[in-house]
Image (spheres, rainbow, N blue to C red):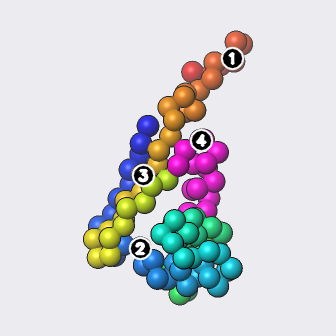
Amino acid sequence: MVIEIADDGRGIDWNRVATRAKSLGLPANTAEDLETALFADGVTTKDEPTETSGRGVGLSAVSGVVVSLGGRIRIHSAVGQGTQFQFVFPFSRLRPSYHPGSHAV
């Protein structure tokens, strides 16, 4: 199963991701490094945090849930055009398990 979320915003500023990743001691030499860093704790491209963003915890939390369900995340981003996240899950991991005597549907 694939869930896609997209916007038509500025896109990901990979240079800012690289700068922040390096400041945290994370690898930032390849596109794969930068995608991994984007989901690391403390990585943000915001200069100042707000009430809802800029603390570097949101994407890390999302990644944790996706991985715990056996999924993976694909990123497609273009500067000035927006970003698309694809959350790809094996269907077998998403079906509720039936346990005799339980009330789960």
Instruction: Count how many numbered circles sit on residues in the image.
Output: 4
Residue at 57%, 56% in the rendered image = 62
Q: Are marks 2 and 4 in contact (CB under 8 Å)?
A: no
Label 1 Cα neighbours within 10 Å, binned few <14 / some 14-19 / many ≥20: few
Q: Nearer the viewer, mark 1 or mark 2?
A: 2
**Residue 19: which quarter of the image?**
bottom right
Q: What span is in magenta?
A: 59-72
Q: Secondary structure at mark 4?
A: loop
Disc 3 and disc 4: Cα gap in Å?
14 Å
* Disc 1 + disc 2, Cβ < 8 Å: no
For disc 2, the marked residue is 12
Disc 2 element: loop
Tell me the kind of residue under disc 4.
Gly
Mark 1 secondary-structure assignment: loop
> Which comes before the other along the chain, label 1 or label 4?
4
User: Between tags 1 and 4, which lies in front?
Assistant: 4
Q: What's the residue type where badge 3 is placed? A: Gln
Q: Residue at x 62, y 59 (%)?
A: 61
> Which residue is label 1 attached to?
99
Tell me which residue sits at (54%, 28%) in the image: 92
In the image, 100: left or right of 93?
A: right
Label 4 crowd bin: few (<14), some (14–19), many (20+), radius 10 Å: some
Reading the chain from its start, which is encountered first: label 2 or label 4? 2
Q: Is residue 59 visible?
A: yes
Which residue corresponds to mark 4? Answer: 70
Dot 3 corresponds to which residue? 86
The CA span between labels 1 and 2 is: 44 Å
Q: Residues within 10 Å of mark 3 (few under 14, many from 20)?
A: some
**Could you tell me the amino acid type at mark 1?**
His
